[in-house]
Image: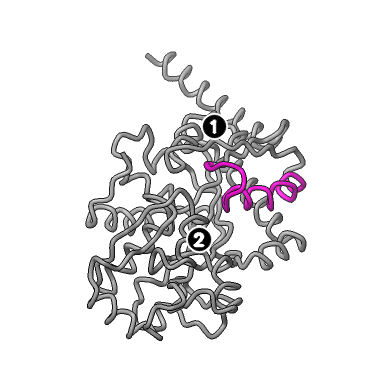
Amino acid sequence: MHFARALAAACLAASMLFGSASAQNYPVRPVTLICPFPPGGATDAISRIIQDALAKSLGQAVVVENVGGAGGSIAAARAARAEKGGYTILIHQVALAASLTMYPNLSYTEKDFAPIGLINTAASVFAARPNLPANDLRELVAWMKEHGHSVKMGHAGVGSYGHLAGVLVSQELGVAPTQIPYRGAGPATVDLLAGQVDLESLSAVSAGPLVKTGKLKAYAAIGRKRFAGLPDLPTMGELGYKKLDLDFWHMLLAPAGTPRPIIDKVNLALRAAVADERVKRTFAEGGMDLFPSDEMTPEAAGALLTREIKLWGDVIKQNGITGG
């Protein structure tokens, strides 16, 4: 009995020593950054923006691997099953929080991930076709209530951030438009410009030039602060809808069980990457905000993910949204 306990203690000590040494030397080979969406989208763009700066900070190549499908859940499942040595990390966004409610038979839960750090936020704009008669949010709400289900709200597809944000906006405003899904934000915006749909919650970067040239009407920004490209446009929170003070975000995660020293090393590398002047300039030009330093801890990322799972889970359940 004493021998067995001594052997177990020795194995545990050796494991801890090996883990510590492994973390000290990490990384000794390239790191794979799994992106849950195809090339060309916002999450892929963020991956490419931070890729080189992250590699420079880590001292090893960072290889972006696009693993699309099922609203980002295929990539999340793969990352959750990956080795726990820090050589496979995941970039994800709001879709990760939503997937945990939308897809009932997932092979992973929140507990299968170790958050590393938050990267950026981006605001959205609640916009309408240019000839819609309402001139401010108060008039818009009255118009939407008058026309009920005949009001059409386009979005980038079931479970997309534009869809979920549009549903939450409608819920908070007390209106019930008909949601029209598209295969991506681009086609939805094309039909909004053509007047085939009435409204859309779309990225502020996409909406800005269209609003400035009068091709779209904007009623409010959906975000914690005003969008720099449309400084006179109030946020939903400023107009009294505090629950709509929310942002589209990205974060890095590792498989649960990844040693904390490795999590901390990647977190420090992420902080250095987003402090890079080229990276900061690229984010600013894209209308995106970086998280302040005190919100870039693994704990802050985990807390945000937990809050967002609750927020979007409630929206999905209350509105009967299913992802198949």
Magenta span main SS: helix
Q: Is residue 300 magenta?
A: no
Q: Residue at x 28, y 45 (%)?
A: 322
Q: Position of residue 200 (x, y in %)?
A: 42, 65
Number of numbered discs present?
2
Position above or below: 125 against 48? below
Q: Residue at x 39, y 68 (%)?
A: 199
Cα separation between marks 1 and 2: 44 Å
Magenta residues, as a range? 36-57
Q: Which residue is mark 1?
A: 84
Q: Amino acid at mark 2?
A: Val
Q: Which mark is residue 190?
A: 2
Q: Position of residue 123 (x, y in %)?
A: 51, 68
Q: Alpha-carbon neighbours of circle 2 within 10 Å: few (<14), some, or many (≥20)?
A: few
Q: Position of residue 97 (x, y in %)?
A: 40, 50
Q: Nearer the viewer, residue 114 or 172?
A: 172
Q: Quadrant of the C terminus?
A: top left
